[in-house]
Image (cartoon, rainbow, N blue to C red):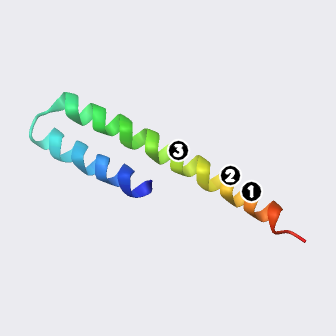
Amino acid sequence: MLRYAVIFFVIAIVAAVFGFGGIAAGAVSIAKFLFFLFIALAVLTLLFGASLFKK
C-alpha cells in the first residue's frame, strides 16, 4: 500500500512538471489517502499484534 502511495506521488510530480494540474491534484489526494490508510493500519497491527501474542 505504501508502494502505491509513492507511485501516485511520483505521478503527481510528473504531471505537475508537465502542467497537468488536475491530474496532479487527483494523484496527490489519492497518495495522501493511501499514506494515511497505511499509517492507520500499521498502528492497528502493532497494537493488536502486541496484545494477541502477549502471554
The residue lying toward the viewer, choosing from 47 and 21, is: 47
* Residue 47 circle label: 1
Q: Earlier in the sequence, mark 3 or mark 1?
A: 3
The crowd level at tag 1 (other Cα within 10 Å; few <14, some 14-19, many 20+) is: few
**Cβ–Cβ under 8 Å for marks 2 and 3:** no
**Cβ–Cβ under 8 Å for marks 2 and 1:** yes
Q: Earlier in the sequence, mark 2 or mark 3?
A: 3
Residue that badge 2 annotates: 44
Provide residue 9's location: percent of width, then percent of height: 30, 47
Q: Is residue 25 left or right of residue 1?
A: left
Tag 2 secondary structure: helix
The crowd level at tag 2 (other Cα within 10 Å; few <14, some 14-19, many 20+) is: few
Tag 1 secondary structure: helix
Q: Is residue 17 above or below residue 7?
A: above
The residue under the point 77% across, 64% down is 50
Measured in 3D between alpha carbons, the distance from the residue under mark 3 to the one under mark 1, in whole angstroms, is 15 Å
Provide residue 11's location: percent of width, then percent of height: 22, 46
Amino acid at dot 1: Leu
The residue under the point 45% across, 39% down is 33
The crowd level at tag 3 (other Cα within 10 Å; few <14, some 14-19, many 20+) is: some
In this view, the residue farthest toward the front is 52
Amino acid at dot 3: Leu
To which quarter of the image does residue 52 belong? bottom right
The residue under the point 18% across, 30% down is 21
Residue that badge 3 annotates: 37
Q: Is residue 11 above or below residue 26?
A: below
Q: How many numbered callouts?
A: 3
Measured in 3D between alpha carbons, the distance from the residue under mark 2 to the one under mark 1, in whole angstroms, is 5 Å
